[in-house]
Image (tube, rainbow, N blue to C red):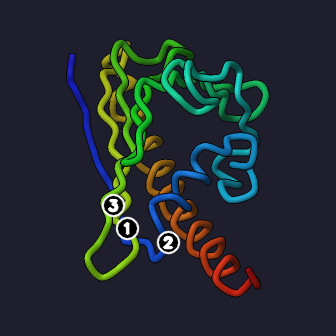
Amino acid sequence: MTTRQFAFSSPCRASVETVLALLDDVDGWSAWARPLVMHTSWERWGDSTPAGAGAIRKVGAWPVWIRELILTRDDTGQTYTVISPSAFTHYLGSVTLRPLASGGVDVEWRVEFVARRRIAGPVLNTVLQTTIAGLLKRLVKAAERKSAREERSPR
């Protein structure tokens, strides 16, 4: 079977903490991820924190739900795998945040997968690339908006 992988990255004027807060607030994803993701929720919280290792998030819209298991979560991002549907024999996604010397952060969203059925590989690759690129763009925009609001609000 063929392993497919891709990565998208984007600079973001927001802080690592702001980007992580948006990723961790799974119940709020639909505020910034629509129309790519219509609904998200925590199915199970993680071991040490709600968004920590062991957490399961449910992403999508009825009748198509994707269940993702958070494998790692630290102050530089997270890794996750898809546990259902069973379209993959292997799936590893990661969001990595690297502070920039000029301020802000570089956000990289990377995916590696093996399709369960070889014929589905090219289609899944196209759909996933389109979705992940769109999610990254929306995540960065939402983080920058949130950061700007926080800077304007009186302390």
Q: Which comes sooner in the sequence, label 1 or label 2?
A: 2
Q: Amino acid at mark 3?
A: Ser
Left of 82 or right of it: where is 42? right
For the point 67% across and 19% down, the residue is 44
Residue at label 2? 14
Q: Tag 1's secondary structure?
A: strand
Query: What whole-number distance in Å separates the C-alpha atoms at marks 1 and 2?
Result: 7 Å
Position in image of residue 49 (x %, y %)? 59, 29
Q: Which comes sooner in the sequence, label 3 or label 2?
A: 3
**Residue 111 against residue 64 in the figure, above or below:** below
**Residue 99 against residue 155 in the figure, above or below:** above
Are circles 1 and 2 on residues that touch, CB within 8 Å? yes
Q: Quadrant of the C terminus?
A: bottom right
Q: Amino acid at mark 2?
A: Ala
Q: Callout 1 environment at 10 Å: few (<14), some (14 to 19), or many (20+)?
A: many
Q: Callout 2 environment at 10 Å: few (<14), some (14 to 19), or many (20+)?
A: many
Left of 41 or right of it: where is 147? left
Q: Tag 2's secondary structure?
A: loop
For the point 51% across and 58% down, the residue is 17
Q: Using the image, tell me which numbered label, if any, was put on residue 105.
A: 1
Q: Using the image, tell me which numbered label, if any, was put on residue 9.
A: 3
Q: Quadrant of residue 115?
A: top left
Q: Callout 3 environment at 10 Å: few (<14), some (14 to 19), or many (20+)?
A: some
